[in-house]
Image (cartoon, grey):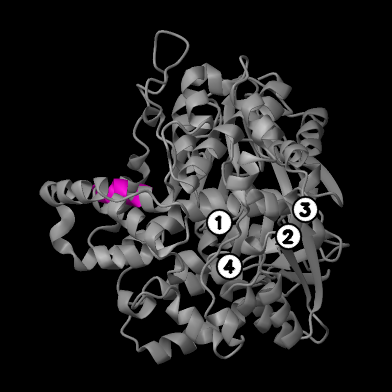
């Protein structure tokens, strides 16, 4: 696991070192740089990295070259099937000099070119320099677990694991991108290929970018999730298939030369990972749980049941945070605005885990792959009600919605019904936005406008374009398949995996996600809808599988997520900070929106239900925090 960066142009050791130093938190153990020979135009490649040593600690230093020096790579992530690939390469005559997973990349590229990506099973962001072709290949793993950013400036083409790595070399081309701000307000995150800066781009999950002569010459997706063709399989066989694949996915993720632990919540996903990992280790597995004094958000009792059953070396972290001061530190870790409030407990549990282990397994992906959200049940119901797709039926739903009182909670049955009605009163794309993100459309702030005579969001494309494009690429499929495949390409990589990457890498910790194993994803996405979801329950396959491993209270527990008492925090602990940041005359929120409208939002003059009000206030607060702690601090 590393932080990587590079320059295609006129690199110097000083420039590369500055970029690597900005990424030191991602790899506190070691670092190094390499500069290649120049061509007739004076263009050279410079590669640098910071290392978090996990595999082949004495021999895995980067950059790594092929035996003839024709291919050079720097790499962030883990290739879990590196041992099998290494044996294949040696059998074909390659000479490997290390035991690291990084070295297989250069030899696979020699044999397969860019198609070598199809052989990798893992998480990665990598750069390959082809000396003969003088081309730079950048690639990101299929589901987007590891990030990679790039830009073209007057100083050449640059790439880095985090935006701060690029800015350490030059702040050129860092004007804010209003389209990305509009997207953030809707989704709570900025979606690739854009970033918050106009001059900086991001690789999409499963994407390749090729650069030559200091510029991008091509980019393409080498992988997307597919829901077809469907597999004919019984529920019993599907559960066994998942069991076999998950056990193997956990096994290869236990490969490490340093201690491995597990994030353990009170849910099915992390419980299963913990159970399977504990059975495969010869010594107690280290588990870490974060909890709150507020019982409504505390899953320690459930996590404790799993820890006791499998005899883990269990550690509990009770969070009684000074949220106002901690929020500044957390916001600083992100290079872009990030509006998922679960970033807070993620940060705490990563910090606690790093005191005991260097690698952790987690349950990321279980909800998106196996139907763990109530909105998937809503989508299934909507599929039954095929007659509801037209404008007339949407009008009837809007009429019914106007007669319903607003819910006071978020997880209640009535709140689910109310949100279902809101979605059914809209078209399919807007419905997905409402059921999944339910963010803040700039136009929702009545009368809000930019301080200039131009309304900044007038030229912004609708946030739904991301969803519409995915729907179009999926073609005809069932409602549940459409929702899960869309989440695998939006909510999962751009929110959940960003949160996990930033939280763990900020503490020099590596996170691995067995439920997002490539082979498991390819198999489960092709299961028929009725196998993946039935009745009103969520994740039936995983819950049935959990019957083999976990006690009943966990198998039957409702989905709670990694939540925080956000409404109470915004009303109490963060009240003064929220008003100070959001209403600051020099801050980004009052630059974008009318200050009186922001005041109305803070006072909830629109009488939004608590969950929606909290979501909207939090999105603007974190935009303001990013502006104050990152944007203006950098002087961008």
Disc 2 from disc 1: Cα separation: 38 Å
In which quadrant of the rendered view does residue 376 lie? bottom left
Number of residues whose C-alpha sits closer than 10 Å to that of mark 2, classed few (under 14), some (14–19) or many (20 or more): few
Q: Is mark 3 on a helix, strand or loop?
A: loop
Q: Is the residue 92 above or below the residue 241 in the image?
A: above
Number of residues whose C-alpha sits closer than 10 Å to that of mark 4, classed few (under 14), some (14–19) or many (20 or more): many
For the residue pair 246 and 235, the one nearer the viewer reads as 235
Q: Mark 2 points at which residue?
A: 293
Please name the predominant secondary structure of the magenta segment in the image.
helix
Magenta span: 426-433
Of badges 2 and 4, the one in the foreground is 2
> Horizontal and vertical percent for residue 156?
63, 26
The residue most toward the top is 453
Residue 140 seen? no
* Quarter that holds the C terminus: top right
Q: Does the magenta stretch include residue 631?
A: no
In which quadrant of the rendered view does residue 278 lie? bottom right
Q: Name the residue under label 3.
A: 320
> On residue 361, which mark appears?
none
Q: Is mark 2 on a helix, strand or loop?
A: loop
Disc 3 from disc 1: Cα separation: 36 Å
> On residue 121, which mark appears?
4
């Amino acid at each position: 696991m590393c932080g990587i960066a590079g320059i295609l142009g006129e690199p110097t050791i000083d420039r590369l070192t500055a970029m690597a130093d900005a990424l030191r938190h991602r790899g506190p153990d070691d670092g190094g740089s390499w500069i290649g020979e120049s061509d007739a135009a004076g263009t050279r490649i410079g590669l640098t990295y910071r290392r978090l040593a996990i595999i082949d600690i004495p021999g895995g230093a980067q950059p790594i070259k092929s035996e003839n020096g024709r291919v050079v790579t720097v790499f962030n992530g883990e290739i879990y099937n590196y041992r099998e690939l290494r044996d294949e390469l040696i059998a074909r005559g390659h000479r490997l000099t290390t035991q690291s997973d990084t070295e297989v990349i250069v030899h696979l590229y020699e044999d397969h070119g860019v198609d070598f990506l199809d052989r990798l099973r893992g998480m990665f962001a990598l750069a390959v320099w082809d000396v003969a072709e003088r081309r730079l290949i950048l690639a990101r793993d299929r589901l987007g677990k590891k990030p990679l950013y790039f830009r073209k400036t007057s100083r050449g083409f640059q790439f880095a694991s985090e935006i701060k790595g690029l800015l350490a070399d030059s702040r050129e081309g860092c004007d804010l991108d209003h389209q990305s701000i509009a997207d953030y307000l809707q989704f709570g995150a900025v979606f690739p290929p854009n970033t918050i800066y106009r001059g900086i781009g991001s690789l999409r999950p499963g994407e390749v970018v090729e650069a030559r002569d200091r510029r991008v010459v091509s980019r393409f997706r080498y992988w997307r999730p597919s829901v077809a063709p469907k597999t004919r399989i019984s529920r019993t066989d599907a559960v066994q298939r998942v069991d076999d694949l998950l056990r193997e996915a956990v096994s290869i993720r236990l490969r490490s030369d340093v201690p491995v632990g597990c994030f353990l919540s009170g849910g099915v996903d992390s419980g299963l990972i913990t159970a399977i990992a504990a059975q495969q280790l010869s010594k107690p597995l280290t588990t870490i749980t974060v909890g709150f004094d507020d019982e409504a958000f505390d899953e320690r009792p459930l996590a404790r049941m799993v820890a006791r059953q499998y005899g883990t070396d269990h550690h509990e972290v009770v969070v009684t945070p000074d949220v106002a001061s901690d929020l500044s530190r957390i916001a600083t870790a992100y290079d872009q605005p990030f509006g998922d409030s679960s970033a807070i407990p993620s940060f705490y549990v990563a910090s606690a885990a790093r005191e005991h282990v260097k690698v952790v397994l987690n349950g990321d992906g279980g909800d998106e792959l196996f139907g763990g959200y109530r909105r998937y049940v809503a989508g299934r119901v909507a599929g039954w009600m095929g007659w509801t797709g037209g404008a007339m039926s949407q009008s009837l739903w809007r009429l019914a919605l106007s007669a319903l009182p607003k819910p006071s909670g978020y997880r209640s049955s009535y709140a689910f019904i109310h949100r279902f009605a809101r979605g059914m009163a809209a078209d399919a794309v807007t419905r997905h936005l409402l059921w999944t993100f339910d963010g803040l459309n700039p136009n929702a702030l009545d009368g809000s406008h930019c301080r200039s005579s131009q309304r900044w969001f007038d030229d912004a494309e609708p946030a739904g374009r991301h969803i519409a494009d995915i729907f179009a690429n999926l073609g005809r499929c069932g409602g549940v398949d459409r929702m899960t495949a869309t989440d695998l390409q939006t909510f999962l990589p751009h929110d959940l995996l960003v949160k996990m990457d930033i939280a763990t890498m900020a503490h020099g910790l590596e996170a691995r996600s067995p439920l997002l194993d490539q082979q498991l994803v390819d198999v489960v996405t092709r299961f028929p809808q009725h196998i993946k979801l039935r009745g009103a329950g969520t994740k039936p396959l995983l819950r049935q599988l959990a019957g083999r491993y976990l006690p009943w209270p966990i198998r039957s527990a409702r989905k709670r997520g990694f939540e925080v008492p956000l409404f109470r925090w915004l009303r109490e602990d963060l009240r003064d900070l929220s008003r100070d940041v959001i209403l600051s005359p020099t801050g980004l929120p009052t630059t974008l929106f009318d200050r009186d409208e922001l005041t109305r939002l803070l006072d909830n003059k629109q009488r939004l239900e608590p969950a929606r009000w909290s979501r909207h206030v939090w999105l603007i607060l974190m935009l303001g925090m990013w502006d104050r702690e990152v944007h203006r601090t950098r002087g961008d």
